[in-house]
Image (tube, rainbow, N blue to C red):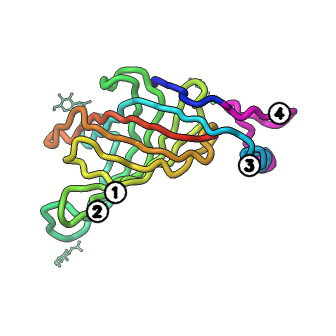
């Protein structure tokens, strides 16, 4: 995962004998304390770049169809899939794993092939290990760039807001697999 921090001003918390997981104090009291101090903290901007892998077929699928509408639709409307995508630093599935994209996507348009996506990017590397971003949005998969919203986050990404840009790197509809390039820009505290 490549990382560029644009703004400075990380929130520094005083932590004494409170349980800390992944560098973030996580009990309800600690969250409340963090929340109160947050109003004095400067926002910072973080950019992330990685790839996710949608494998509907094969030996190790990363997505599965969980429901399907009983209608005939040229846009496959009403097809719901659940996924747990590996997030890798390079387009190759075998490259370094930095996290997972866990959630669901379903075809939500009667007029074009278009997904509604609701997922969490769950990070497993370095300073982001254990933190997550909640992503929701409109994914017209046939377009080159698709823009989704970062609606929140946890850990170092508490109260994050931002934009995810998806760009299809590889797509084989008959094999049921795709590699998608992901750029994330978020502001958080
Ligand atoms: C699907 O729809 C058809 C036509 O309305 C109906 O006959 C059939 O029983 C439905 N199948 C299921 C599994 O609901
Ligand atoms: C991430 O955190 C988990 C749980 O604390 C730990 O087991 C794992 O080794 C960490 N991974 C990395 C790459 O730091
Ligand atoms: C995706 O499908 C293509 C074509 O069948 C295949 O060559 C490739 O290995 C597949 N990728 C993965 C990661 O399964």
Asked whether the residues under the numbered discs 2 and 3 touch, taking CB atoms below 8 Å apart as contact, a structural biologist would say: no
Some atom of ligand 2 lies within 8 Å of the CB belonging to the residue at label 4: no
**Can you identify the residue that label 2 sits on?**
108
Q: Marks 2/1: CA distance?
A: 6 Å
16 up-or-down from 116: above or below: above
Q: In which quarter of the image is ligand 2?
A: top right
**Can you identify the residue that label 3 sits on?**
35
Q: Marks 2/3: CA distance?
A: 36 Å
**Horizontal side, residue 69 vs residue 162: left or right:** left
74 up-or-down from 65: above or below: below
In terms of sequence position, does the residue under pointer 1 or pointer 4 come before the other?
4
* Highlighted range, magenta: 9-29
**Can you identify the residue that label 4 sits on?**
15
The picture places residue 106, in percent across and down from the top left corner, at 31, 57
Q: Marks 1/3: CA distance?
A: 31 Å
Asked whether the residues under the numbered discs 2 and 1 touch, taking CB atoms below 8 Å apart as contact, a structural biologist would say: yes
**Which corner quadrant holds the C terminus?**
top right
Disc number at residue 33? none
Front of the two marks 4 and 3: 3
**Can you identify the residue that label 1 sits on?**
116
In terms of sequence position, does the residue under pointer 2 or pointer 1 come before the other?
2
Residue at 78% across / 49% down in the picture? 36
- Residue 95 placement: quadrant: top left
Is 152 in front, or is 77? 152
């Amino acid at each position: 995962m490549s990382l560029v921090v644009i703004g400075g001003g990380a929130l520094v918390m005083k932590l004494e004998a409170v349980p800390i997981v992944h560098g973030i104090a996580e009990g309800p009291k600690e969250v409340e304390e963090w929340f109160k101090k947050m109003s004095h903290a400067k926002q910072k901007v973080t950019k992330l770049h990685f790839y996710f892998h949608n494998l509907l077929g094969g030996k190790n699928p990363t997505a599965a169809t969980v429901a399907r509408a009983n209608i005939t639709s040229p846009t496959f409307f009403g097809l719901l899939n659940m996924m747990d995508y590996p997030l890798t630093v390079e387009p190759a599935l075998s490259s370094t794993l930095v996290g997972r994209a866990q959630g669901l996507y379903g075809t939500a348009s009667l007029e074009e092939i278009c997904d509604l996506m609701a997922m969490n990017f769950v990070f497993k590397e370095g300073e982001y290990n254990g933190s997550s971003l909640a992503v929701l949005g409109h994914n017209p998969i046939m377009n080159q760039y698709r823009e989704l919203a970062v609606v929140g986050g946890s850990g170092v990404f508490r109260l994050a807001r931002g934009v995810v840009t998806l760009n299809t790197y590889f797509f084989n509809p008959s094999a049921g697999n795709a590699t998608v390039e992901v750029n994330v820009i978020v502001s958080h505290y």
